[in-house]
Image: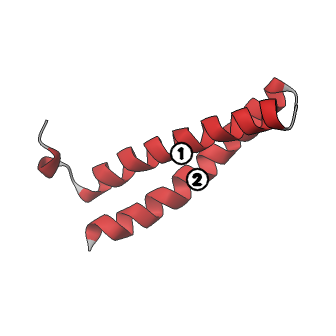
Amino acid sequence: MDLNSWTPDDNARRFATLIATASAVFTFLALWLGAAWNPLLALLLAAVDAVIVWLVVRAGLRAYFRR
């Protein structure tokens, strides 16, 4: 795979997906196991966290990769 052929938008989207997934897993485990919340509520909030993190990180990475 040639990483240099990806556009800045491709890089931002892929890295944002990785970061958002890691954040969602951490949030889910922290709420479920650490705070002893209901697993379904923890999963719902982890999904919301993933969407918010993805949007913010993608915007930041797009600006970073386009310069």
Residue on which disc 2 sits? 53
Q: Which mark is residue 20?
A: 1
Q: Is residue 18 above or below residue 38?
A: below
Viewed as shown, does residue 16 lie left or right of 37? left
Residue occupying the far top of the picture:
39
Q: Is residue 42 above or below residue 61?
A: above
The percent coordinates of residue 35 (x first, y second) are 86, 38
Q: Identity of the amino acid at label 1?
A: Ala
Q: What kind of element bears circle 2? A: helix
Viewed as shown, does residue 63 lie left or right of 51? left
Q: Real-space Cα distance between discs 1 and 2?
A: 5 Å
Q: Quadrant of the N terminus?
A: top left
The percent coordinates of residue 46 (x first, y second) are 69, 39
The percent coordinates of residue 66 (x first, y second) are 27, 68
Q: Is residue 59 above or below residue 34?
A: below
Task: Give the image quarter of residue 67.
Answer: bottom left
Number of other residues with Cα within 10 Å of mark 2, as a class: few under 14, some 14 to 19, many 20 or more: some
Q: Residue at x 30, y 51 (%)?
A: 11
Q: Residue at x 69, y 43 (%)?
A: 48
Q: Identity of the amino acid at label 2?
A: Val
Please tell me which of labels 1 and 2 falls first in the chain: 1
Viewed as shown, does residue 32 lie left or right of 10? right
Q: Residue at x 45, y 57 (%)?
A: 58
Q: Are marks 1 and 2 in contact (CB under 8 Å)?
A: yes
Task: Give the image quarter of residue 42.
Answer: top right
Q: Residue at x 36, y 54 (%)?
A: 12
The percent coordinates of residue 45 (x first, y second) are 75, 40
